Amino acid sequence: MRNLQYSERLNKLGLWTLEERRNRADLIEVFKILNCFSVVPVHTFFALSDDTRTRGHSKKLLKKRCNNDLRHHFFSERVVNRWNKLPSYTVEAKSVNQFKSALQKLRTT
């Protein structure tokens, strides 16, 4: 394994890249917050979009406008686009484990 490139080692071992693991952890945390599996209230970080015309799932988050470049890296800002792109069967999972399984299925397809 020592002579293989990083990406080749990850593929051989079936592991996710660091960026994928961070994105996955962010999405899991959003799921927990939106479904009250976390002690953090939803309105602390997110506002749900009330626009019913959009495609996708019913739990879309509203993207706040920010002028400061620093704010783009906040948890509540960096995760909104990724969350809104998820398919409805993933977002509407009944438990955290179902959500994790749906994310794994998305990764493999």
Image: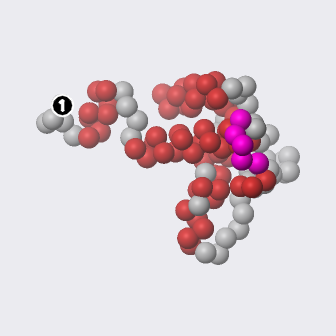
Estimate the x, y position of residue 53 in percent, counting from the top left: 84, 48
Q: Is residue 55 visible?
A: no
Q: Which quadrant of the rendered structure holds the N terminus?
A: top left
Which stretch did the figure color magenta?
37-42
Q: Residue furthest front?
A: 39
Q: Residue at x 86, y 51 (%)?
A: 50
Residue 63 percent coordinates (x, y): 71, 59
Helix, strand or loop at mark 1: loop
- Asked if residue 101 is positioned above or below residue 51 in the image, the reply reads above
Q: Does the magenta run of residues contain 38?
A: yes
Instruction: For residue 4, say whether it is visible.
Output: yes
What secondary structure prevails in the magenta region? loop
Image point 79% across, 53% down: which residue? 43
Across and down, in percent, residue 8 comes to 26, 34
Q: Does residue 67 belong to the magenta stretch?
A: no
Residue bearing mark 1: 1
Colour mapping: secondary structure
* Closer to the camera in the image, 32 or 58: 32
Q: Nearer the viewer, residue 55 or 20?
A: 20
* Horizontal arrangement in the rendering, residue 101 relative to residue 94 (left or right): left
Amino acid at the residue labelled 1? Met
Mark 1 crowd level (few <14, some 14–19, many ≥20, 10 Å Cα): few
User: Residue 17 occupies which quadrant of the picture?
Assistant: top left
